[in-house]
Image (tube, rainbow, N blue to C red):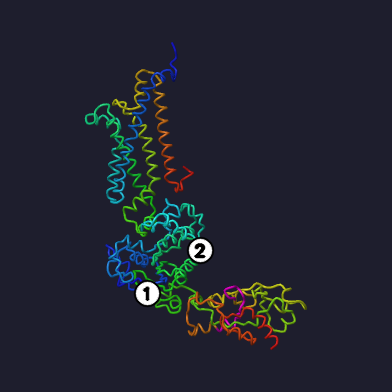
């Protein structure tokens, strides 16, 4: 009896169109929640800084959501968003992204030194201009650090969606496990890791381009 | 002019930071608010540009109540320098300086040109313009902070402990830079500090505030040092008040002797004939070279051959009595060489001459005047005439080039 090899290259060649489709699906389901999460986290973070009493409850709720097992949330969502739809996966991932990004936005805005904020006021910035031209740009390094954590987590979590029928590259794990066939599992793992790595690298690159003024430059 | 009219700042919890403060900040002068922490000096400053609003009373800016002006508009017309410079870390130096012009809607090019001009003005290398704040030292950042505050050429400058976070040497140079700039720009400056030495050094007028926001005394530095209003002010002024006060007395009353100046070409015999133990040797352009101890001179030759002791100098007519006194203490001969603005010797001040000047100060006859007074070397026939008579000259005079005459006169006489 032939020993099953770890990777059957011919299988990859034959199934490449399928793998490519799964990869694209994976990218969309991982990154759309990050984008939407960031868009929602910005105003919520700003609100948390503006009205301090709001911050702790917001973070509390987000942490509870973050602690819910993703599989359980997927299952609960099926009646609303449907079985094996992208929505079922992306909605919880958006909340997970927010759980990381809201504190990142708040911490980022708190990282603006008080004397810098004071001098912006004294120079005659209006509150909106101060936010857009001084506070948010200075918050960028901290927000980007949060974005990196959220993005890598999101890329990895999409796979779990395979258990409710829509998990991008996660499908390869189920497929390989059900058939006791390693190749799809290896391909899935490698692609998820590479995808997470590329996303992270792009964010590091973005950080260097966006914040040449940051002291942390060079040590990153 | 900035006018405080019975200004009080009371916080919601009942704390009174500033209590019924009334004073005037004259146009074109530096007024320093000084006092211990909790005296309300920073609060008072921030009420001017409405970073804090007064609870009672009015603050008038050239007669207009600041409360009637929209805060951002008000602030764009008032320069502000903060302790840690408060530079925007994400903007290059040139863009930091251009901040207020851009807020005022200047064209980018014009704002940047103006920023470059100001960097130069505060003594920064134009190469710094493209750098980010973290690449600059604390002292350089503070200069940028001053340049930024001046960018839109506001008539009023508020400075909140701007130099207290830098080391003493840098602080001194920044203070001198500020005085130099102010001599050119004549801004109305309100300067807050907890350092009384800084206050008397920079202030045309000094407002001493006590805890709870009460004005204890408002006077020019010389008066403040000479006549503290009460024990609090006296204690706050600290030690050496008498000596420090000399910084505000001009050296104009110091009698200068031109007969102690001797050209290097003077021969030893002539030098001995003066009967003076020490002679200040000057070169052909009348610049001081050092002191010659006459007893130690060899039998022949000129003063140029002898080893000269170092000398202390002060700029006649510009430096304070304190500087003159200091110079005599640093000189082995016990006398200090008075020079004009170009560094040429105009005479020597002996300890006796200093004594007389100090006695005049002590008796209160010597009118206080700022050290940075009238320029020296303005030329006066008095010194020349006195020198010609081989006698003593009083005051700053254009005795340059007459030292030799003085000596010759002394010898002949």
**Where residue A21 appears, x then y in whole percent?**
35, 25
Q: Which label belongs to residue B168?
A: 2
Q: Earlier in the sequence, mark 1 or mark 2?
A: 2
Question: Where is residue A72 shown, x and y percent of the image?
Answer: 27, 31
SS for dot 1: strand
Chain identity of mark 2:
B
Label of residue B216 in the image: 1
The range drawn in magenta is: B339-356
Hey, which quadrant is residue A199 in on the image?
top left
Which one is nearer the viewer's eye here, A150 or A14?
Answer: A14
Q: Residue at x 28, y 39 (%)?
A: A64
Q: Is residue B350 magenta?
A: yes
Q: Which is nearer the eye, A108 or B400?
A: B400
Looking at the image, residue A16 sits to the left or right of residue B348; the answer is left
Residue sitting nearer the eye, B330 or A63: B330
Q: Which mark is residue B145?
A: none
In the rendered image, residue A166 lying in the magenta stretch gets the answer: no
When asked about the image quadrant of residue B260, the answer is: bottom right
């Amino acid at each position: 009896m032939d020993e099953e090899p770890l990777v059957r290259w011919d299988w990859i060649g034959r199934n490449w169109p399928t793998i490519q489709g799964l990869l694209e699906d994976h990218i969309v389901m991982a990154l759309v929640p990050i984008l939407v999460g960031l868009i929602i986290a910005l105003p919520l973070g700003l609100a948390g800084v503006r009205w301090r009493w709001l911050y702790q409850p917001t973070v509390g709720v987000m942490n509870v959501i973050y602690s819910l097992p993703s599989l359980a949330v997927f299952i609960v969502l099926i009646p609303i968003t449907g079985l094996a739809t992208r929505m079922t996966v992306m909605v919880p991932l958006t909340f997970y992204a927010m759980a990381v990004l809201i504190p990142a936005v708040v911490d980022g805005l708190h990282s603006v030194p008080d004397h810098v904020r004071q001098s912006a006021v004294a120079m005659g910035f209006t509150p909106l201009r101060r936010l857009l031209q001084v506070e948010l740009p200075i918050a960028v390094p901290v927000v980007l650090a949060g974005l990196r954590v959220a993005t890598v987590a999101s890329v990895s979590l999409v796979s779990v969606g395979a258990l409710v029928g829509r998990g991008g590259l996660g499908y390869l794990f189920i497929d390989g496990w059900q058939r006791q066939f390693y190749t799809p599992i290896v391909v899935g793992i490698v692609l998820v890791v590479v995808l997470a790595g590329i996303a992270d690298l792009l964010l590091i690159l973005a950080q260097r381009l966006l914040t040449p003024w940051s002291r942390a430059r060079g040590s990153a | 002019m900035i006018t405080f009219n019975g200004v009080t700042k009371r916080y919601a919890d009942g704390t009174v930071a500033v209590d019924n403060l009334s004073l005037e900040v004259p146009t074109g002068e530096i007024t320093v608010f000084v006092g211990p922490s909790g005296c309300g000096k920073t609060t008072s400053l921030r009420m001017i540009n409405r970073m804090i609003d007064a609870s009672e009373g009015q603050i008038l800016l050239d007669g207009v109540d600041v409360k009637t002006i929209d805060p951002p508009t008000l602030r764009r017309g008032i320069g502000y320098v903060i302790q840690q410079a408060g530079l925007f870390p994400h903007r290059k130096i040139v863009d930091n300086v251009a901040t207020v012009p851009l807020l005022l809607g200047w064209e980018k090019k014009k704002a940047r040109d103006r920023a470059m001009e100001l960097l130069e003005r505060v003594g920064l290398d134009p190469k710094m313009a493209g750098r980010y704040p973290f690449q600059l030292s604390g002292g350089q950042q503070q200069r940028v902070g001053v340049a930024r505050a001046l960018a839109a050429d506001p008539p009023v400058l508020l400075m909140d402990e701007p130099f207290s976070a830098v080391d003493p040497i840098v602080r001194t140079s920044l203070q001198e830079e500020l005085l130099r700039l102010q001599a050119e720009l004549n801004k109305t400056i309100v300067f807050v500090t907890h350092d009384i030495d800084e206050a008397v050094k920079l202030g045309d007028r000094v407002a001493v505030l006590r805890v709870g926001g009460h004005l204890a005394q408002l006077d020019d530095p010389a008066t403040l040092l000479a006549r503290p209003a009460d024990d609090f002010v006296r204690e706050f002024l600290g030690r050496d008040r008498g000596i420090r006060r000399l910084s505000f007395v001009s050296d104009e009353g110091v009698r200068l002797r031109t007969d102690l100046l001797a050209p290097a070409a003077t021969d030893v015999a002539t030098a001995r004939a003066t009967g003076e133990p020490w002679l200040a040797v000057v070169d052909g352009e009348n610049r001081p070279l050092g002191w010659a101890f006459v007893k130690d001179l060899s039998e022949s030759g000129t003063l140029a051959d002898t080893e000269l002791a170092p000398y202390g100098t002060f700029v006649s007519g510009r430096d304070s009595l304190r500087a003159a006194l200091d110079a005599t203490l640093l000189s082995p001969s016990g006398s200090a060489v008075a020079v004009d603005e170009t560094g040429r010797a105009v005479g020597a001040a002996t300890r006796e001459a200093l004594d007389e000047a100090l006695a005049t100060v002590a008796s209160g006859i010597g009118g206080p005047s700022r050290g940075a007074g009238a320029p020296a070397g303005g030329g006066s026939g008095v010194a020349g005439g006195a020198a010609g008579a081989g006698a003593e000259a009083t005051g700053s005079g254009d005795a340059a080039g007459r030292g030799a005459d003085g000596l010759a006169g002394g010898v002949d006489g």
